[in-house]
Amino acid sequence: MTVEQELDIDFELPNVGAGPNPLSLAAVAEANEFVLLLFQRDYHCTNCRSQVQAVNDHYAEFRERRTEVVSIVPEPPDRLRGWQEEYDLPFPLCADPEAAVSERYDQPVRFGLLGSLSDFLGRMPKAVLLDCRGAEPTAAFSHEGSSTWDRPEIVDLLAAIDERR
């Protein structure tokens, strides 16, 4: 995926967080100037949990920028409900148990076959900022993590939005 690439946003995912269930990315894109997709590794990942909590702490700053945050986790909805109950996230928390959407957005997986068998070992985090102001949303910013800790800071995500406003 390259920056400014047009994207396929025609999908729905089960949502256990704020917003409609199922969540239509096309509807979210239509209602916002930007959408920040956070592709998580798995339910047990402590860095993923820290990231959604950090976004929660700064969620008002994203909304001030007409940006909706959508966290996507390659887990079934029942498992994700634990995150929602624990963190009370004000943004969508979507289940992608088959990792179909994660694959469409080229979420990195390392360790070859072993990594493909275990999201916890192989799947790396990814952040994609969609600019939804044109006729079709484009990827305005993308960060592919090379390790479980390699994620953009909140200040960097907000700066990426500000640069495109």
Image (cartoon, rainbow, N blue to C red):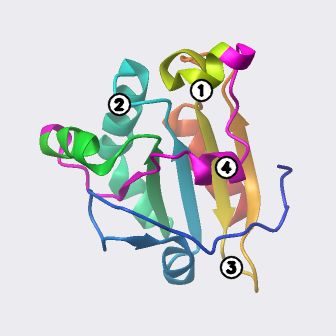
Discs 4, 2 touching: Cβ within 8 Å:
no
Earlier in the chain: of badge 1 and badge 4, it is 1
Amino acid carrying label 2: it is: Tyr
Mark 4–mark 2 distance (CA, rounded to whole Å): 27 Å
Residue at image point 74% right, 17% down: 112
Helix, strand or loop status at disc 4: helix
Mark whose residue sits in front, 4 or 2: 2
Residue 138: image quadrant is: bottom right
Of the image marks 3 and 2, the number of the one nearer the N terminus: 2
Q: Tell me what residue is drawn at x 31 percent, y 71 percent.
A: 21
Q: Which residue is mark 1?
A: 123
Residue named by callout 4: 160
Q: Classify mark 1: helix, strand or loop.
A: loop
What range is drawn magenta here? 86-113
The first of marks 1 and 2 along the sequence is 2
Q: Which residue is rendered at x = 72% and y = 55% of the image?
A: 163
Q: Position of residue 31 (x, y in %)?
A: 49, 82
The nearer-to-camera label among 3 and 2 is 2
Q: Is residue 37 left or right of residue 72?
A: right
* Label 3 element class: loop
